[in-house]
Image: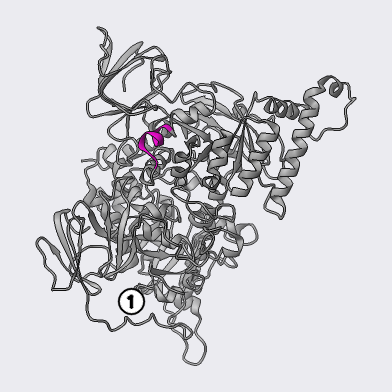
Amino acid sequence: MISWLAAFAIVGATIHTGDGPPLEDATLLVSGESVVALGPGVAVPEGVETIDGRGAVVTPGLVDVLSRLGVMEIELEPSTIEATLGQGADPVRAALRASDTFDARASTLPPARAAGITSALVVPSGGLVSGQSAWVDLLPGAPPRRDPVALHVRLGLGEGPGSRANSFLRLRELWADARLYRGNRGPYISRRLRDLAVSAADLEVLSRALGRERIVVFHAHRHADILALLRMIERQRLNARIAGGAEAWLAADELAAAGVGVILDPRLNLPYGFDTLRAREDGARILHERGVELAFSTFGDAHRPQRLRIAAGNAVAHGVPYDAALAAITRVPAQMFGSDAGVLRPGAPADLVVWNGDPLEPARWATHVFVRGRPVDLTTRQDLLTRRYAPRD
Amino acid sequence: MSRAWIALLLGWGLLSCVAPAPRPTPAEPPPPAPAAEPETWLLVRGGRVMTAAGPTLERADVLVRGERIEAVGTDLEGPAGARVIEAEGRWVTPGLIDPHSHIGVYPQPNLRANADGNESSDPFTPEVRAEDAFWPQDPAIERALAGGVTTILVLPGSANLVGGQGVALRLVPALSAAGMRVDGAPTSLKMACGENPKRVHGERSRPKTRMGSLAMLREELADAQGYTPPKDAPPDPARAALAAALRGEFLIQHHCYRADEMLGRIALFEQFDARPRAFHHAVEAYKIAPQLAAAGVAAVVWADWRGVKLELEDAVPAGAALLHVQGVRVALHSDSPEDIQRMNQQAARALAAGLRAGLELDADDAIRWITANPAWVLGVESRLGTLEPGKDADLTIWSGDPFSVYTRAERVFIRGTEVYARSAEPEPPRSDFELGRELF
C-alpha cells in the first residue's frame, strides 16, 4: 500500500471509465480527491508518484446501491442487525434513517473495499415503508456522505393472504394523506385536519417523495406488481426505481417508456416463490436491449461483496455487453441516486480500483483501491487469520 | 429478495440432516436396467482435458465406450460409427460433484409445503432418508446440470444431531430418486453440531448447549454400538443406521463449523473406533489442517460464505487453499440451488484467494475440489470424479476455461449419455412444475 499522496498517476494501464470502451496503454492522473486527466497521451508532471499499470486494469470504484454494509453483522443474531423494522414494529416508518446506525468501522467494510467497492447506498429493511437510505463512501470511519437519499418500499405485509392487496391499499392511503398534509401543513399543525395515518415525521418524508425531492425505490419481483407500481408511479408522479425485478424483463417496454430504472441480481434464475416464476438469467440482457436503465447489486449480501463484480461477469456470459455490465456496477447505479462517482473523467471523484486483470473474473483481484483519492488498506481480518494459520516453511 | 435468500439459507446451510434405515425397503423399485443396446462409442477430440488426476492435457481426446471411459490421451481413435465431438478450443472436465445439496428436499418454489429437509420432531432421526422426500421435479436440477454438475449428495438438514440418511444421485431425468441413485454408492449419515440443533430443539427440549449435543450423541452412539437386528422382532432402524455408521458402512457426513467442535467430534468417534468421512461447512478446518490430515477426514467448505451465524465468523476465502497445501482432502460444496449452478466459479474464487495469500497451487489442484475430492466424500471415488480409463463416463464440455466467469457448460454426459446440450434458444423446461409457465 502506498501512503496518501497529494497527487499520483497510474501509468500504462487499461482504463475502463465506466462510460464506453476502455482506453488502452493509458495514464490516469489524480490530484487531491479528483481525477485530473486520463488517456493514452497524458503526461505525468515531474515529482508525481506513479504506479506501474502495465498489465493492470483500472476501473471506477464499484457501487452497490442495495447494500447492508455497516448496518448488519450476523443475520441470526438480532442484536447485530440495524436499520430495520423488526418483527411486530409499525410497518410504515418513512422517517427511519439507515444513517443513524451506520458503522463505518463494521467488520464488513474491509472485505467490501478489498472487493473494489468504494461507495454504497445503505438501505433500511423490513416492513412496507422501510425508511430512508444513505450514501456512504467506504473510507474507514467516515460518516455517510449524503443522507437521506431514497425512500424504500417493499411489497408484502407478512406472508398472509392478501398481503400485496393490503400493501397497495395502504400505499394509496399514505399517498393521499401525504398529499393532504403537503398542501395543509398549517391546518395539520393546528389540528384542523382529519386524522392522518402516520406521524408528522413520516408524512414529511412521504410529502418530499411526492415532490420528487426523494427518490422512491420499490422492491418487487412479480410482473403484475411491477405494472401496478408503474401505474402508481405515474399517478403520483414519483421519481422511482424498481429493485428486485426478477420478472422485470416482461415489463421491459413499459419500464423503458416510464424511464424507471431497475436494480437486479442478474444471476437470479430460480422460481424461489410464485413472484419469481419467470426469473431468467438473460433477463438483464432483455432489459438492456430494450433501453431500460440497469444496475446490479448484491441485494444486501454484506458478507460476500465479491458477488457484485462476479454478478456482472455472469450477466456478460448471458448476453449483456461488457461495457454495459461494468457500467451496471459503477456509473449507472451512481447516476440513479444522484452521485458523481462511478465514472472516471476529469473532475470526477478519484474512486478507483486497480485490478490484476479483468475485474469481472473471479480469478482476479484488486491490488489498489482509492476512495476520494486516498489509498485504502486492503488487509482484512480474514487475511490476518489466514496469515496466523498458514503453514510455516 | 435478500429476505427470501435468508430463508433459503436457513433451510439449507443452517439446518441440514436425516437418519438411516437398512435398505432396500421392499416398496422401492430398483433402478431400471440399462436397455440392451449395441455398445456406443464417443470420441471427444482435441480439447484441453482436465482429468483431475494429473496435469491438464493439451489437445487431448477422451474415448468413451458405452458407459465407461475407455481411454484418455492423444490421437485416439474410435471404431467406425463412433460419435465424434470436435472439442478444439473447448475444455473437458469430469462432471462436477456437489457433496452437499438439498435440491429435491428443499426444492423450489421455496414454500412451506415443499420444506422436507428437516425431520425436526426429534434430535435423533437416523432412520429417515432424504430420498424418501426427494422431489425430482425441482427446477433446480436442470439448472445444476446446465452448470456442468452430474452428481450430488442430497442430505437432510442440520436441525438434528443425527438428521438422517443422504443419498448420492446422478442428475438424470427420473420420476423418483430411485431412478437417479449412484448404484452401489454407500449411504451417508448426516450429523450436526453447533448452533442449529440447539437452536431448533433447545427451546422446547434438548440439546440446549454444545456440551448437551455432544453428551447426547455419545449416549446414542453407545446405545447403538454393536446393535444387530433381533431374529424374533422387527429391527430398530434408528439403531441399525447408527451402528452401520460406526462400522463404517454408512459414511458420516458431519455438519460442523468450529475447529474445537471438529476436534471434539473426532475424539468422540475415536472412542467408538469410527471417524467422520467429512466435516461439512468446515469453515474453521484451516485452523486444524494437520489434525484433519492425520485423521484422514475430508473438509467440505465454501469459497466465501459468511455472515449468517456467529460460527461462520472466522471463515476465510483462502481456507480451501490452506487445507489443500497441508494435505487435507478438500471439497467445495454449494448447499444452495443458486451456487450449485456455478461450482466452477466457486473453485476459481477459492483458488484466487489462495494465490492472493501467496500459497502455491494451481488450476489442476482446484479442479479436484469439485470433482475427485467430492467423489471421495461420497465414497464413489473408484467410479467418479476423474477422467481415467474404467471410470464412469461423466464429463462436461465447457466453452472455454472452466474457471472463467464467461465460460458455460456446452454438453454434459452421464455414463456416456448426453444429458444436456446448450442451445441458442431457451429450451422448454424439463421439470413438470415449470412447464407452460413461461408461455403465458
**Residue ID at (58%, 67%):** B122
Residue A148 pos. (x, y %): 61, 25
Look at the image and give the residue range highlighted in magenta: A320-327
Q: State the residue in front, B431 or B206.
A: B431
Q: Is residue B304 left or right of residue B324?
A: right
Residue A60 pos. (x, y %): 39, 26
Furthest residue in direction bottom, as rendered? B232
**Residue ID at (36%, 30%):** A379
The residue beneath circle 1 is B184
Residue B201 pos. (x, y %): 59, 60
Name the dominant secondary structure of the magenta segment.
helix
Can residue A381 be seen?
no
Seen in the picture, residue B191 relative to A247 is either above or below; the reply is: below
Residue B309 pos. (x, y %): 51, 47
| Chain of the residue on which disc 1 is drawn | B
Q: State the residue in front, B354 or A41.
A: A41
Determine if the magenta segment contains residue A61: no
Q: Is residue A331 left or right of residue A354?
A: right
Q: How many numbered callouts?
A: 1
**Residue ID at (75%, 41%):** A170
Quadrant into which the C terminus of chain B falls: bottom right
Furthest residue in direction right, as rendered? A192
Q: State the residue in front, B304 or A171.
A: A171
Q: Mark 1 is on which residue type? A: Gly
Furthest residue in direction left, as rendered? B75
